[in-house]
Every structure is written in C-alpha cells, then in structure tokens.
Image (cartoon, grey):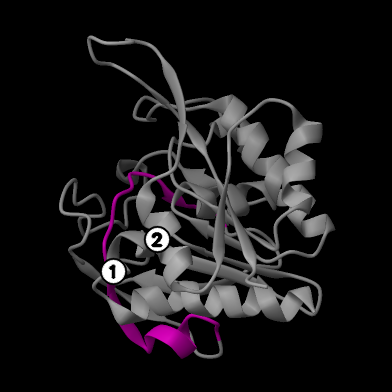
Amino acid sequence: MKPIIGISGSILINKGNTFSGYRRSYVNQDYVESVLRAGGIPFIIPFNEDLESTREMVEQVDGIILSGGHDVDPYNYGEDPMLKIGEVFPKRDVFDMELYKTAIKLKKPIFGICRGYQIINVINGGTLYQDLSYADFVKIKHDQVDNPTQATHFVDLEEGTFLKNILGKEYKVNSFHHQIIKDVAPEFKVVAKSSDGVVESIEKITEDSFIIGVQWHPEMLSLNCEKSQEIFNSFVRKVIEYKK
C-alpha cells in the first residue's frame, strides 16, 4: 500500500463579488501533484479548531507536510509584533503545532515548507526575524514576488545532510518570503544557507524522528525540476522506512 502523506491545509477567503467573505479549505495543487509523482497518497488535512479531530487525522497518515502560508505569530517566540510583520493567523499556528506535536509523538516524518519550516523552528525553541529588513546582513532578494517556477538564487548545502545527498553542494531555489530564521532551534542542524547567510534549511534526523524544513518552495519547481521532485521522492521513501 502506498504511504499516505498528510498536507496541512489553510483557509482561503473569497474576496470576489460572489460569496464574498466565504471561507474555503485549501492547499495549493502543487503539493498534491508532487506527492502523487513521488508515489504517495496526498491527504489534505483541513484547518480546523477541533484539536482532538486533528490528532485523529494525523493518526490516519504516515507522514506530514507542513505547507506555506501566513506569517507565524511572533507571540509564539516571545516577541511583540513589529511594524513590518505581515498577516498572521494565530489559530492556524495552533493547528499546525498540533499536527507537528502529534506526528512527533507517533514518530511520523515531517517536511516543512516555507511557513511550515518556520513553524518547525519556532515550536522547537527557535526565533524569526519578522522582516528581512530587520536582519542587516541580508544582501540578496528573497521575495521574487512572481514566477513561482523560476529559481532565482543559490543555496550552499552542508556535507552529511539529507538534502546535500539529493541536491549537491550548490542548488538554485525560488524564493517567496519576507521572514527568516534568527535563532536556530536547539538540536537542529543547519542544512543550507544563501550567499548572504540566511538559513534556508534545517533538519533533525535521529532513530526516532525525521524532520526536515526548507525556506523555498520545491513543490512549485518539482514539475520541471528533477532534483526538486527528488526531495519529495526521498521524503516518501523515508516515510516508508519509518513506517516499518
């Protein structure tokens, strides 16, 4: 049986003339297709506030992808909101963190992307810069704004890491974020950095846990980029391995 990969969902609020304000559960289709190509069964876990039901949903899947979205509420890492923070969704923070905690308890692999990567760092004791402008070492453009399938800057990968074995020493990524990791969570290893020193990936891989996170969006590149798709392929293989 193919492994079931749970993908964290969010809420999309209709801003058009028809059903204005109507709330829809969603994830971007790229996540679904990346998992399908990797040989997994995508299972969208809809955002909800029933934590018991959320925990039961995690029990039904074999691995978790924490998807992108809103800024993480800075109160989660002990800061007041600063002037350049974007829109936050505190209830989704609670939801994503419950997904993470339940998956850890059940020893299920976790892959965080963009916001999901930041959630992993924060829930484990790390912090974020609330905007790129608050980090004086940032020198390159980290929010390309458009063209999601176009890679725009390189990251350097550390030896002996999960992604280094897939992507090689240097890899070009797309970039859609205005927040970055400040303090890396204890027990997590830095996997990749951009040329200006921004931490672009972290991991924690032990006998009992497999946790990786990336700041970029490999799901948007995966259709036309073999190495980006291979991240999902390798994650699904790890899910199978940890399931045994």
Distance from Cα at disc 2 to Cα at disc 1: 8 Å
Q: Which residue is mark 2?
A: 33
Residue 145 position within the rendered picture, expressed as x and y whole percent measured from the top left: 19, 46
Q: Nearer the viewer, residue 4 or 166?
A: 4
SS at circle 1: loop
Q: Which residue is mark 1?
A: 223
Question: As shown in the figure, which amino acid type bears the numbered disc 1?
Answer: Leu
Q: Nearer the viewer, residue 137 or 77?
A: 77
Region rendered in magenta: 161-183
Q: Is residue 58 left or right of residue 28?
A: right
Q: Is residue 92 above or below residue 223?
A: above
Q: Nearer the viewer, residue 41 or 87?
A: 41
**Picture residue at 58% right of the left edge, 36% below the top:** 46
Residue 135 position within the rendered picture, expressed as x and y whole percent measured from the top left: 36, 49
Tag 2 and tag 1, C-beta contact below 8 Å: yes
Q: Is residue 17 left or right of residue 129?
A: left
SS at circle 2: helix
Q: Is residue 72 above or below residue 124?
A: above
Residue 134 position within the rendered picture, expressed as x and y whole percent measured from the top left: 36, 42
> 10 Å neighbourhood of mark 2: few (<14), some, or many (≥20)?
some
Disc with the residue nearer the chain's start (2 vs 1): 2
Give yes or no for residue 39 being in the magenta stretch: no
Question: As shown in the figure, which amino acid type bears the numbered disc 2?
Answer: Glu
Q: Quadrant of residue 155?
A: bottom left
**Picture residue at 33% right of the left edge, 10% below the top:** 19
Name the residue at the front extreme: 1
**Picture residue at 56% right of the left edge, 62% below the top:** 41
